[in-house]
Image (spheres, rainbow, N blue to C red):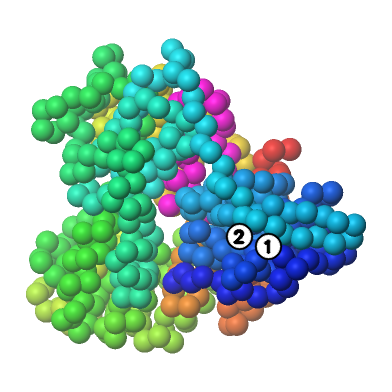
Amino acid sequence: MAGGEASATGPDLQAGITLASLNEESPLLGHVGEEPVILVRKGNEIFAVGATCTHYSGPLAEGLIVGETVRCPWHHACFHLRTGEAVRPPALNPIPCWRVERHGEMVFVREKLPPSPRPVRAHSPELPQSVVIIGGGAAGNAAAETLRNEGYSGPITLLSADDAAPYDRPNLSKDYLAGTAPEEWIPLRGESFYAERNITLRLGTRAVAIDLAHRLVRLANGDSLNYGALLLATGAEPIRLNVPGASLPHVHLLRSLADSRALIAAATTARRCLVIGASFIGLEVAASLRARNIEVHVVAPEAHPMERVMGPELGAMIQALHTEHGVCFHLGATVAMIAPDHAVLSTSERIDTDLVVVGIGVRPATALAEQAGLAVDRGVLVDAYLQTSAPGVYAAGDIARWPDPRSGQAIRVEHWVVAERQGQVAARNMLGSKERFDAVPFFWSQHYDTTISYVGHAETWDRIELDGSLKAQNCIARFWRTGRILAVATVGRDRESLEAEAAFEAESAA
């Protein structure tokens, strides 16, 4: 989804508006000069903040007010109305704030306020002497930034096996692969960001062992690092296909920026692609390659794409959408072998292809945790504060299995926004906050101009309640189990997605 700046529309807020025109907790869109601004009234207080989300430029005027925050309808970023702070990812940067004056029954927006200063924590024995973060993805980057934003001044080392600085991984299968997102959108931060915040970023660096007794991380090059607190954010690794021909040079995986670039290079000459797996990644790849006018075939064993997560009805809608865009499905089948110019399916069908993309899932990268002797069960087990079985060692992102307050079970979720939010909470808990991780899982998946938003977590369900029109791509699906709604998926109903998230949060807090 390409971002774009909102235009200056609505009333001139410097000229003033009537108090009666402000509905309680309903954003009013206006402008100050050329900058779009929303006014939000909460009781006797009125807030003026920027109207554009700093993630992908979503329209905050269409968002939801929850407490003293405004939430973006596109990807559920959350901003504080008093400070503009980006309190919840995927947004990392704040929105601006303006001073508001009230004269009688008129409200005026005055000058823009300076950014709120970051706190500074005095050094104390309670704080870790140093922090080492293993993993340069969503969780690791969010943790490093949060430590500095919370005023931590000790050494921070961010180790990443990737050769690229932290980047916007969700875009790799979406606009970037389709050719509609420019290169400058991909890095999460500019080249000088980490140096300016005194974060030591070590790229192309692999940790091979953790010595819990001596609080050491050993690296592949023979170096070792001491840590006062340690965050494991090693993410997940793609499952590799195990059939003849799976290692041929035209067979690609998509996990890293290097993978995406290699796939883009291959797509410049490819005429026909076979996508193995009808997962979110697989179908996003299919949509992006169709945008490049490549013939795309998708093979998967399910009866409907994404059926395991979305159910058969939404799966059928997604299949119809891709079929309309020219994708050919081969469902109820797997790949038996791959040759340089074709593949053979389990049904004996032959598909000519000069490009293959494998998207059959990922596994949590738990080898380092297992070597260290941490508790591992289909992920690294953590408590409500994201601490592992070893004091001072935390885990976040795709590897973390945490106690979900809504289901009462330990769950693991492989989604970007969850990983970022866990990185933030783990960082604050390293500094003594004792903050429970209770955020409701959220993700989005983009297919052409259609976006599916999903809040909650339903590994199984006993019924799906559908409202709206699947054909019109304007619907909401509620996933029920034993009389409770566990998750909600929406298409074309961003507001209802936000409302479902807020309702789940209120349920957990009750």
Given the image, on which type of amino acid does mark 1 rest? Ile
The part of the chain drawn in magenta is 416-442
Q: Horizontal placement of 361 versus 15: left or right?
A: left
Question: Residue 325 lies in what quarter of the image?
Answer: bottom left
Q: Closer to the camera, 94 or 287?
A: 94
Does 417 lie within the magenta span?
yes
Q: Horizontal placement of 368 versus 243: left or right?
A: right
Question: Residue 195 lies in what quarter of the image?
Answer: top left
Residue at the right extreme of this rendering: 104
Pointer 1 residue: 38
**Quick one: quadrant of the N terminus?**
bottom left
Pointer 2 residue: 50
Q: Position of residue 160 (x, y in %)?
A: 25, 42
Vertical side of 7 occupied by 24: above or below = above
Residue under the point 69% across and 52% down? 99
Vertical side of 282 occupied by 65: above or below = above
Q: Position of residue 363 (x, y in %)?
A: 31, 47
Q: Position of residue 170 (x, y in %)?
A: 38, 60
Where disc 1 sits, the SS reads strand
**Quick one: quadrant of the C terminus?**
top right
